[in-house]
Image (spheres, rainbow, N blue to C red):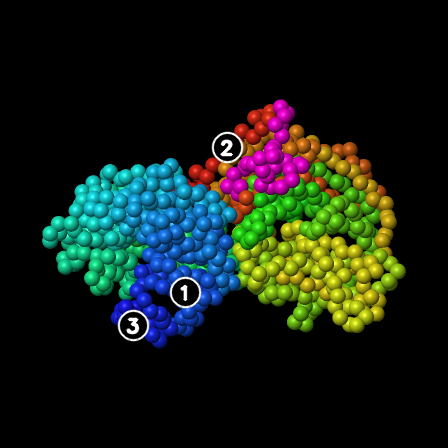
């Protein structure tokens, strides 16, 4: 046996297998190119007799065999392989089909894989799997898997998330076809749902199966010519593709005829209505049998050419002449290589939708090159990419040949707080950061650990110049604009009146339980450090001397969003009094990881998240930890307060903050002493609260590249952005009774919802001369985002409640069932939200 690696050199092919380092013995059954390490270069996995081989591309037309260290060199005979991101953690895993149980190698993104076939539910039995294909067949936002078994026991595995699949073959109507050989997946009737062609070596058993829009399939009886012409063909392979660029998928079937001198290769053309008809005279007449198909534009002329292997091992390359008479669009998805790791580099598994006038098309991305025919239409109006991490990205009036680069986009965070500042409503901060229902901390590693289930109980400061009275009222507007569901149980406003020469702060950080609670810190004199430098010696003092939206730069991006290379900030305090209280104040923001990134990180020991620590110099001149968990800002523009009293030596009052979390600081100062000036505190309860739909504010980066995402309240779009968590939400209208006490009777808000909350300020006393007024927003509630690795991230339920010991909770716990709480559910939570508007957003648009 021998193998070939054919390099395209201006339309001619040359075997470069030897000089490329492809070196193994034995008969191969499958070879797949994919970029498993997200470096932008296509690697190669070969299934063969004896050990399989994984070759890593060096990017210089050379491959290195990394099978042993990767742990993917299975010795048992295999039939094929498939790269796909089964656990939605941003890298490509490997499914290996075999004549025994199948294998699933989970990519740890550190060069090693871990076999998870049985654990994931994809191992199957001794069914002789010959082919497999992935796609979101039930349109619920995650990648499912179709497995073709030669004994006819074909399987459809539904992705249950967190790395688990369930066999739903029977309820999905997956046909049991004897002699099944291959599957081709595509939306051939242009309705947005993935359909199937199932091939069989049994003549007459192959067929087209329509997706009914819910992940169930029925035999397509309308394309009668397909059914009739296949009665005498033993099919080896099939491919749905658009050979004439008219925007509708056609079908090529290859095999052998069961009749003497019969033809075993047929091409079917779509008429645009979802029906396929025989298209004679397109293929060369001498091609009468075939084994395997591949489609690609080998000469880059804008139409798809064909590579065919014969049953005798021969290879035919068929050039498409005339397909490019119609218009087309070619694209590549490009995931971010640094500071992201949310999607695999080429977006394999993403769904791409194209709208051009009345023509709608959708495809699942299976390789780097993506091709859409447009017919007589010169260009597309809009492309929507649904990346494998669930985030949508729209491009309007794209070029006909371009790379579509992943946007660094927030998808989950917390509710946004807007206030009336005397002139307009403006974004102030995000709130309720302490709650992250169902957030995985180690679900893909060796443990299933989730974030604490306690409600977020927060006090967030609003400076007095950002909240002004209007008509004797203070008004807050609280929105949900990211991919999340909010359970808001209580809201209050604390009025803080105090002398002008003293500033008040609260600690607005995430940290260990010992840091929780509500305390006012008084600062009479802000002391600026003598110097602030990073590990490279760069002067950071100009960035942190005052609050001016100039954030500390120079963080070197790591592999993942939210993590950088280990950074150090050294702060020289200058002369301090060791007998006085010493507090450090840090004002800034965090670019966080997310649930799927946490899942990916947990799979390997290569990278760990290091929460910030503070170090000081000891008597030996060595750095030692004085605060082992500083915590981090609860989102955007938050204050951290660290008590350094008695921890910093007076002989060398330098401290150092070390972390690999992506933190950017806008202001750093310290205070000495502990003022005790009078503070008049008045707590206001809401006097009115109204829930309504608003939409989504324009997003931009405040302060440039290193600043946080910020939101322009005056510019809003109302169309749905996210695949909403489905279930019952609070109906629009008056919701005041739900926000007065933390009683598990809360406002359930969806993305795009807004709550306008008013506080009657008519009875507040006048400020004494020389005093000023600030505020605290007090909130209680939970947030659950729609990340594909968040527990129950598809649905509103199960509902959270105070006192639950974990989330997700087990059968031993439940939301309160007493009459009061059940009546609340019936009276308030009557607004049903589904994903229909999101999934059909492009399908219904017309010219």
Q: Residues within 10 Å of mark 1 (few under 14, many from 20)?
A: many
Q: Is residue 262 magenta?
A: no
Q: Residue at x 39, y 61 (%)?
A: 75
Residue 216 located left or right of residue 141 = left
Residue 29 located left or right of residue 620 = left
The mark that comes first in sequence, 3 or 1, is: 3
* Marking on residue 432: none
Q: Position of residue 578 (x, y in %)?
A: 86, 62
Of the pair 385 and 318, the residue shown nearer to us: 318
Q: Residues within 10 Å of mark 2 (few under 14, many from 20)?
A: few
Residue identifier under label 2: 832
Residue 791 located left or right of residue 30 = right
Q: Position of residue 596 (x, y in %)?
A: 53, 52
Res. 381 visible in picture: no
Residue identifier under label 3: 15
- Front tag of 1 and 2: 1
Residue 287 is drawn in which quadrant? Answer: bottom left
Q: Position of residue 728 (x, y in %)?
A: 53, 33
């Amino acid at each position: 046996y021998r193998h070939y690696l054919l390099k395209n050199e201006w339309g001619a092919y040359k075997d470069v297998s030897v000089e490329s380092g492809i070196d193994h013995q034995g008969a191969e059954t499958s070879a797949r190119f994919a970029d498993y390490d997200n470096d932008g270069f296509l690697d190669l996995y070969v299934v063969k007799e004896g050990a399989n081989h994984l070759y890593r591309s060096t990017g210089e037309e050379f491959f290195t065999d990394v099978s042993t260290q990767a742990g993917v060199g299975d010795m048992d005979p295999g039939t094929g392989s498939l790269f796909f991101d089964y656990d939605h953690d941003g890298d490509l895993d490997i499914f290996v089909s075999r004549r025994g149980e199948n294998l699933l190698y989970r990519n740890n993104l550190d060069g090693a894989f871990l076999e998870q076939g049985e654990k994931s539910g994809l191992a199957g039995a001794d069914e002789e799997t010959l082919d497999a294909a992935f796609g979101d067949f039930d349109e619920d936002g995650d990648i499912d898997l179709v497995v073709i078994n030669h004994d006819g026991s074909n399987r459809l595995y539904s992705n249950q998330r967190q790395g688990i699949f369930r066999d739903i073959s029977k309820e999905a109507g997956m046909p049991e076809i004897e002699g099944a050989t291959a599957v081709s997946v595509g939306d051939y009737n242009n309705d947005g749902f993935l359909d199937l062609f199932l091939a069989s070596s049994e003549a007459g058993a192959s067929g087209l199966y329509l997706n009914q829009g819910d992940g169930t399939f029925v035999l397509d009886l309308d394309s009668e010519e397909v059914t009739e012409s296949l009665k005498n063909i033993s099919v080896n392979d099939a491919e749905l593709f658009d050979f004439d660029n008219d925007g509708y998928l056609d079908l090529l079937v290859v095999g052998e005829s069961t009749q003497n001198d019969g033809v075993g290769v047929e091409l079917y053309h779509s008429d645009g209505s979802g029906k396929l008809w025989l298209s004679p005279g397109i293929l060369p007449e001498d091609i009468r049998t075939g084994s395997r198909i591949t489609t690609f534009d080998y000469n880059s002329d804008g139409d798809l050419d064909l590579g065919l292997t014969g049953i005798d091992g021969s290879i035919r390359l068929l050039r498409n002449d005339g397909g490019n008479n119609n218009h087309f669009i070619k694209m590549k998805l490009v995931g971010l290589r640094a500071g992201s790791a949310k999607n695999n580099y080429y977006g394999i598994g993403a769904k791409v939708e194209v709208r051009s006038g009345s023509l709608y098309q959708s495809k699942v991305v299976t390789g780097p090159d993506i091709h859409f025919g447009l017919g007589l239409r010169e260009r597309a109006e809009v492309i929507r990419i649904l990346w494998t991490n669930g985030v949508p990205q729209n491009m309007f009036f794209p070029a006909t040949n371009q790379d579509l680069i992943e946007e660094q986009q927030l998808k989950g965070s917390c509710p946004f707080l807007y206030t009336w500042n005397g002139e307009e409503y403006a974004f102030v901060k995000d709130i309720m950061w302490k709650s992250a229902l169902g957030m995985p901390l180690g679900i893909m590693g060796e443990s299933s650990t989730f974030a604490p289930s306690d409600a977020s109980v927060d006090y967030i400061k609003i400076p007095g110049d950002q909240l002004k009275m209007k008509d004797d009222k203070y008004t807050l507007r609280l929105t949900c604009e990211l991919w999340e569901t909010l359970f808001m149980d209580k809201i209050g406003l604390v009025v803080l009146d105090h002398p002008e020469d003293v500033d008040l702060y609260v600690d607005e950080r995430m940290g260990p339980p010992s840091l929780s609670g509500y305390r006012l810190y008084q600062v009479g004199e802000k002391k600026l450090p003598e110097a602030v430098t990073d590990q490279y010696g760069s002067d950071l003092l100009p960035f942190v001397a005052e609050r001016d939206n100039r954030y500390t730069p120079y963080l070197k991006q790591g592999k993942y969003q939210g993590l950088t290379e280990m950074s150090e900030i050294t702060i020289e305090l200058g002369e301090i009094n060791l007998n006085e209280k010493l507090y450090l104040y840090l004002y800034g923001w965090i670019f966080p990881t997310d649930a799927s990134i946490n899942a990916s990180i947990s799979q390997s020991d290569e990278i760990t998240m290091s929460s910030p620590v503070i170090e000081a110099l000891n008597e030996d001149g060595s750095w030692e930890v004085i605060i082992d968990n500083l915590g981090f800002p609860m989102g955007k523009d938050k204050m951290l307060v660290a008590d350094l009293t008695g921890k910093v030596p007076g002989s060398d009052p330098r401290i150092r903050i070390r972390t690999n979390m992506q933190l950017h600081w806008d202001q750093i100062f310290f205070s000495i002493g502990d003022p005790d000036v009078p503070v008049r505190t008045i707590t206001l309860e809401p006097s009115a609260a109204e829930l309504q739909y608003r939409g989504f504010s324009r997003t931009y980066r405040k302060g440039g590249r290193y600043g946080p995402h910020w939101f322009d309240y005056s510019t809003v779009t109302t169309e749905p952005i996210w695949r909403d968590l489905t279930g019952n939400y609070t109906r629009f209208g008056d919701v005041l009774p739900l926000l007065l006490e933390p009683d598990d009777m809360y406002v359930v808000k969806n993305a795009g919802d807004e709550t306008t909350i008013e506080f009657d300020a008519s009875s507040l006393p006048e400020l004494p001369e020389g005093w000023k007024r600030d505020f605290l927003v007090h909130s209680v509630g939970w947030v659950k985002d729609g990340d594909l690795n968040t527990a129950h991230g598809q649905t509103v339920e199960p509902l959270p409640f105070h006192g639950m010991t974990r989330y997700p909770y087990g059968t031993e716990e439940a939301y309160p069932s007493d009459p009061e709480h059940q009546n609340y559910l019936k009276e308030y939570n009557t607004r049903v939200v589904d994903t229909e508007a999101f999934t059909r957003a492009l399908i219904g648009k017309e010219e």
